[in-house]
C-alpha cells in the first residue's frame, strides 16, 4: 500500500519513535538492501520452513539474444513470462534482522551489541488487507547479540518498553505467545519447539492484530553464521514493529484527522529519559 501526506508523516514518526527507543540500548543504526543472497536463508533452513512466504528477485535473460526474445514476446499488458529463467540467487528480504546476522559472519565478540535497522520486507499472504496483511511492508527492529543472559535482559526490557509506550498512547494490548507460520508445521521441529518452549510473544491489539513482537532465537543465528562470544555461538533476540499496523492502530484509535493524533516522539522520548534516569 502506498503512503503519502499525513499518513506517510505518521508512519515516519512511528519509525522514528522506535529508533528513539533503540537509543536506550545505544543501538547502532544500520541500512541494508531489500534483497538477500538465497544462500543466507538456506543456512537458516528458511525456504523449507516458509516456502509459501518467499518472494524471489528474478531477471530476464542477460545475453542480447535472450533479451531480444524476451522483448519480442512481451504482451501489450498484464503478466510477463521469463524464458529460460536461470537459478535464482537473490530473495526479497522477509525480515529486517536477517541482514544483521549475515553481516557479522565469523565475528569473535567480547561484549553484547545492540543494532536497529528497518527494511521493506516481503512475505506472501493468502489475502491482501491494507495495512493489516500486505505482501510488502515496513519493519523496524531492535536486535541484541550476546550471551543468553544479555539477550534475556534485553527482551524483558524491550517488552516493558512496548507495554509502556502503548500505555502512554492509550493503546490496549495483550501479550500472546505465538508461533511463526511454518509450512507443514506439525512436521517442523522449529514449530514444535515454539509450542513446547515459547520464544515468540506478540503485542496484540483489538484481539487479532499483532503490532509488535519480541523474539528469542537462542543460538540459531550465531551458529549459522559462526558468530562467537565466550567460546560459544552468540544468542540473539529482537523486538520487531510493523509500521503499517501501528499506523492502522493509531488511526482507528484516534481517527484520521492528524490534529487528534498523539505525539509518538514525545512518548518515546519520555520512556528513554525515564530509563536513563534509572541507570
Image (cartoon, grey):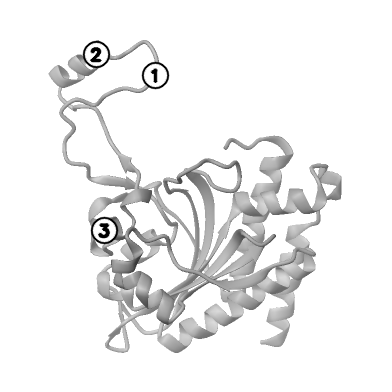
Q: Is residue 133 left or right of residue 250?
A: left
Measuring 46% from the left and 89% from the top, which residue is drawn there? Answer: 149
- The image quadrant that residue 241 belongs to is bottom right
* Residue linked to disc 1: 78
Task: For residue 269, say whether it is visible.
Answer: no
Q: Are marks 2 and 1 in contact (CB under 8 Å)?
A: no
Measuring 33% from the left and 67% from the top, which residue is drawn there? Answer: 186
Task: Name, please, the residue furthest toward the right.
Answer: 259
- The image quadrant that residue 23 belongs to is bottom right
Q: Is residue 80 left or right of residue 262?
A: left
Residue 48: which disc?
3
Residue 64 is situated, as x and y percent measured from the top left of the image, at: 16, 19
The secondary element bearing badge 1 is classed as loop
Quadrant position of the C terminus in the picture? bottom right
Q: CA distance from mark 3 to mark 2?
A: 34 Å
In the depicted structure, whether residue 241 falls above or below residue 195: above
Residue 46 is situated, as x and y percent measured from the top left of the image, at: 30, 59
* Residue linked to disc 2: 73
Residue 187 is situated, as x and y percent measured from the top left of the image, at: 28, 67
Quadrant position of the N terminus in the picture? top right
Residue 145 is situated, as x and y percent measured from the top left of the image, at: 42, 76
The secondary element bearing badge 3 is classed as helix
Measuring 67% from the left and 50% from the top, which residue is drawn there? Answer: 247
The secondary element bearing badge 2 is classed as loop
- The image quadrant that residue 205 belongs to is bottom right
In the depicted structure, whether residue 87 falls above or below residue 198: above
State which tag comes first along the sequence, 3 or 2.
3
The crowding category of the residue bearing disc 2, from other C-alpha atoms within 10 Å (few below 14, some 14 to 19, many at least 20), is few
Amino acid at each position: 500500500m502506498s503512503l503519502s501526506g499525513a499518513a506517510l508523516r505518521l508512519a515516519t514518526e512511528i519509525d522514528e519513535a522506535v529508533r528513539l527507543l533503540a537509543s536506550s540500548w545505544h543501538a547502532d543504526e544500520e541500512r541494508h538492501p531489500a534483497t538477500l543472497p538465497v544462500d543466507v536463508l538456506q543456512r537458516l533452513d528458511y525456504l523449507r520452513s516458509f516456502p509459501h512466504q518467499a518472494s524471489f528477485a528474478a531477471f530476464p535473460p542477460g545475453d542480447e539474444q535472450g533479451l531480444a526474445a524476451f522483448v519480442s514476446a512481451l504482451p501489450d499488458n498484464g503478466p510477463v513470462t521469463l524464458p529460460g529463467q536461470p537459478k535464482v540467487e537473490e530473495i526479497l528480504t522477509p525480515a529486517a534482522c536477517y541482514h544483521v546476522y549475515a553481516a557479522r559472519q565469523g565475528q569473535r565478540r567480547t561484549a553484547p551489541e545492540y543494532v536497529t535497522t528497518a527494511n521493506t520486507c516481503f512475505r506472501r499472504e493468502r489475502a491482501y488487507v491494507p495495512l493489516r496483511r500486505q505482501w510488502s511492508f515496513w519493519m523496524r527492529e531492535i536486535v541484541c547479540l550476546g550471551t543468553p543472559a544479555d539477550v534475556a535482559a534485553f527482551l524483558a526490557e524491550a517488552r516493558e518498553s512496548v507495554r509502556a509506550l502503548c500505555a502512554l498512547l492509550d493503546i490496549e494490548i495483550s501479550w500472546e505467545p505465538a508461533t511463526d507460520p511454518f509450512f507443514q508445521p506439525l512436521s517442523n521441529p522449529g514449530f514444535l519447539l515454539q509450542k513446547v518452549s515459547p520464544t515468540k510473544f506478540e503485542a496484540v491489539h483489538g484481539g487479532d492484530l499483532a503490532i509488535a513482537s519480541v523474539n528469542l532465537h537462542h543460538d540459531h543465528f550465531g551458529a549459522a553464521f559462526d558468530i562467537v562470544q565466550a567460546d560459544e555461538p552468540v544468542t540473539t533476540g529482537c523486538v520487531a514493529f510493523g509500521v503499517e499496523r501501528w499506523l492502522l492502530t493509531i488511526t482507528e484509535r484516534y481517527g484520521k484527522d492528524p490534529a487528534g493524533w498523539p505525539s509518538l516522539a514525545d512518548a518515546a522520548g519520555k520512556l528513554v529519559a525515564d530509563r536513563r534516569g534509572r541507570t
